[in-house]
Amino acid sequence: MASFERVSPALKEILLKLYRAEKPVEIDHHLYEFGSVEYHVQSSAADPQNNYLSISTPLLSQGAMPSYGLSSYSTQMVKQVCSDAVEIVEPAKEGYQLTLKINFARIPRGKDYFKVITQISSVQAVILCSQLKEMLRNVNSQDTSQGMNKPIKLVYHPREPFYVIRQPQKITAVFPLRFKEHSDVIIATAFFQELMDVGSSEKWAKAPPCTWSPIPPPELRGEPLEDLSTNGGFVSFEISSRHVEDKKLDKTVWSLLNFYAYVKKHVKCTRGFIQRRMQKRLESLVEVLHKEKLEEKEDVKFKAHAECRYVGKLVRLSKPKNFKRRCRDLTRKIMQIRFRIKIHGFRRFHRRWLTIPNFSSPLQYTKLE
């Protein structure tokens, strides 16, 4: 769909370059932008004051509007863009819907020139808005020649069509939503439900009522199946006469044209926000685990150091005692081996009872010589 900026930045840069050029510039440049938009800028050194800008843009509707060229209402809206410096060339150059002749000599000098060139750079947005304004400006019209309750398919981008249904006293705009990722469907569904809840509150009672449904609304009955096959459901806005009064018409039209862009931006920002929160949460958890691991290592080192000190102290304290005890035991064993066992009173008992008596034999033997 249309972008958020009405002004084409590339076209604006080229026009400013031509306007500020001190010498005549020969230029023949083609610009291509999103939505199959093409600009053709021509400037001749022989005629530097007259520059030509041709614009090719897809028509918003192929049913209610001419298949080629602009309607009278769109042409009138373009003429209101700096009419003194811009002139519409009839017919337009081949392959383009509109050709403008820009006379830089008629653009006022000073600070106003920047504003004028900015308005010229937004001509494509003016054409796009004028087509939808022409549908919405007669909400209360009783003319049924254009077909009451008949959906009008508006295509600005092939993958992003939407429908406008004229009904008594109101116009309904229906947007089929499609997403590539399943996570985008979940985010968008939550967004649409929140949009309905906020829209039904008293604070936003003046805003167009918004409804979301996973199935096509009854107004789209009979439309091709490929246009109704979506995974994001259908969002509908009911536009009444108070939403298209005076300056509100331009705001309402621009909001409808940018609805797809708003939804995509919201989904993208929400997904990025969730990813950043998850990344931040993951980093905090990793930091906690890392801190806990460091504390465990410090506790293990402290306990190991304390145990080493205790064991060393215990060894230092117990080693002399064990050595002395072993020395005493060894000395005692040596003494037991080296000396006889002494029993108190045993010597007296030995002399009295264990002394072997001397016997004299009556038989005497004579030694033979």
Image: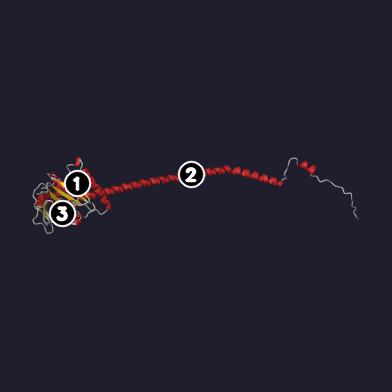
Relative to 57, say whether 346 is above or below. Answer: above
Relative to 218, say whether 348 is above or below. Answer: above
Q: Please report whichever mark, 1 or 2, sits nearer to the chain's N-terminal start.
A: 1
Residue marked by disc 3 = 153
Residue 9 located left or right of residue 357: left
Residue furthest out toward the bottom: 94
Q: CA distance from mark 3 to mark 1?
A: 19 Å
Q: Amino acid at mark 2?
A: Lys
Q: CA distance from mark 1 to mark 2?
A: 67 Å
Q: Which mark is residue 303?
A: 2
Q: Residues within 10 Å of mark 1 (few under 14, many from 20)?
A: many
Front residue (pair 252, 301): 252
Front residue (pair 202, 8): 202
Residue in the picture at 19% in, 46% down = 210
Can you give x and y, in whole percent of width and height, for residue 364 in the image?
89, 51
Residue marked by disc 1 = 210
The secondary element bearing badge 3 is classed as strand
Can you give x and y, in whole percent of width and height, for residue 79 in the image?
10, 50
Q: Are marks 3 and 1 in contact (CB under 8 Å)?
A: no
Q: Amino acid at mark 1?
A: Cys
The secondary element bearing badge 2 is classed as helix
Front residue (pair 231, 16): 231
Q: Please report whichever mark, 3 or 2, sits nearer to the chain's N-terminal start.
A: 3
Q: Nearer the viewer, mark 1 or mark 2?
A: 1
Quarter residue 41 falls in: bottom left
